[in-house]
Amino acid sequence: MARILLTATRSFYRPTNANFHYGLLALASYIKKNSGHHVEILDGSIHTYGEYLGLLEQKARSSDIVGFSMMTPQVGDTCRSMLHLRDKGLRPFIVVGGHHVTLYPGQTVQSDLIDFAVAGDGEKSLLALCNALDSGGSTDNIANVLTRSNATEMLKKPFETLPYEELYDADYGVIDPGIMKAMKKQFCYLTGRGCMFKCTFCYNSAIGNRWRGKTADVVLDEVGRLYEKYRFEKLYFRDEYFFADRDRVARILSGLAVKNYPFTWITTCRASDFRSKIDREIIDLLIASKCEELRFGAESGSDRCLKFLKKGITVEDTLRAARVCAEIGIRGSFSFLSGYPTETSEDRIQTVRLIGKIKKIDKRHIILGPFAYYIYPGGKLYEMIAGNSEWSMKFPESFEGWARSKYGNMFEQQSEPEKFAWLDEPDFVKYFWYIIFFRYIDDHFRGFGCVKSALLKLALSPWLISTRIRWRLLRFGKLYDYRLYEWLDMRRRSVKKHLQSLLKTFK
Ligand code: SF4
């Protein structure tokens, strides 16, 4: 029996238990169900990075295999965590998987910090690898598993995908009790994987992910059993695209309505579904089954940008979705994206206008973002950036290179837009993000608890009030307060540098 630790470093800058790592749950459940290995999860998203390193070291001491799952922004912390284990003299087998590895399996496995890279669906391959390591068998020819010696051969074959039936029945018993406590309020559950759309900025289109879903009967059976066990208040169908199959959705919703569960539910949706897929029958079922919120990727207020992003929706679709949701008492949550190639200042202003219209339709609708587009490897948008010689963006070619790079840092574009050659007016972009930052504090910030958040808002009230006015009047230029802030920040940095060099001299 092998002792396996599956882990991922933090994916946000502060600990949160709202978004536990579903991929780790799927892997651990599969291994537990199909073998006698001991498997444990360490989810870095609920710890500070310092706490995480301590726990990782402690758990790795009694593990034969440590598997890291990572997206590109997590590569830096993952690499530092591996180095930490080495520094402490710990040498379990190191396996990596997740989105970044699926995009770059060949270059990732060349790192001497890594023993195996698992690309694509990881469940079956990871289990086969653990069995081989446990029994001393060969690891040379396991589907989707790369080593430094077999990488060239393995990359000639397509990665295998699992029949979705093999992934049913996640075992929530492997999740941290702290997360399970939070899940009583909002229980996360997947009815399917992947998405059939081809939005150019999205990971799913980058790896050609297709949609796979559980049948309505399986969903209703699993949800019923989970509710009996965990008695949650709200169910979050955390699919990338819940409404992929209209008839399946109709059967799931009528099943929930017949059972008349006391919990409400929320999920993801596409604004274009309100053209025909979400018809009168589905609307009645949404109400009868207690749908509380639908989450939309609205992305932009410019039809030209939506077309460029291949989003498959229009601005009118988003407004229609906002209106219908308001009429039937469902809260809409609309997220936006900004800072990608070809987007102009006028496009950004159209996005702000659309946000205003959505809020006017129903104050309860939630606006998320706009978030900064950060260059995620893979996909058409990435290829466009990488292939443009005038923009001269050089991307890392190794695991360590990605760990050192700042491409995964979504705040970079906000502070130094001039580094991103496709941004049309860097000054405008800087001011735009500055205003969005204060809008975020104004609308959403509850990070330090109610009293401290209120005090922070009071201290920042001159900025909050002025950004509210600028947002309403669409004034994003000539922010003298921002220039003052920049000047003070520059002075602070040069004084700090000066003091550091003085200290060095005295030492
Ligand atoms: S609809 Fe959503 S999940 Fe699907 S490709 Fe577009 S952004 Fe990705």
Image (cartoon, rainbow, N blue to C red):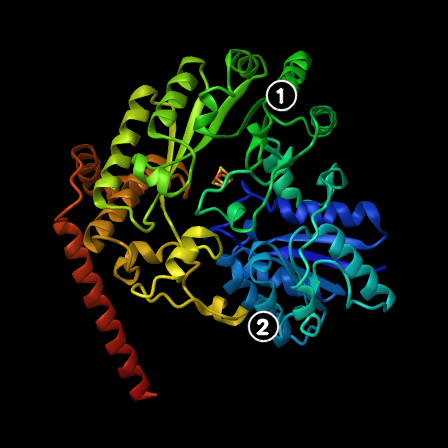
Residue occupying the point 48% across, 19% down = 276
- Look at the image and tell me whether residue 257 can be seen: yes
Q: Is residue 440 above or below residue 259?
A: below
Q: Quadrant of the N terminus?
A: bottom right
Residue 62, image x, y percentages: 75, 64
Q: State the mark number for residue 247.
A: 1
Residue 159, image x, y percentages: 67, 55
Crowding at label 1, few (<14), some or many (≥20) Cα neighbours within 10 Å?
few
98 or 264: nearer the eye? 98
Q: Which residue is mark 2?
A: 83
Specify the amino acid type for callout 2. Leu
Q: Is residue 442 above or below residue 374?
A: above
Q: Is residue 310 above or below residue 362?
A: below
Residue occupying the point 56% across, 27% down = 243
- Is residue 291 rendered to the left or right of residue 130? left
376 or 440: nearer the eye? 376
Residue 20, image quadrant: top right
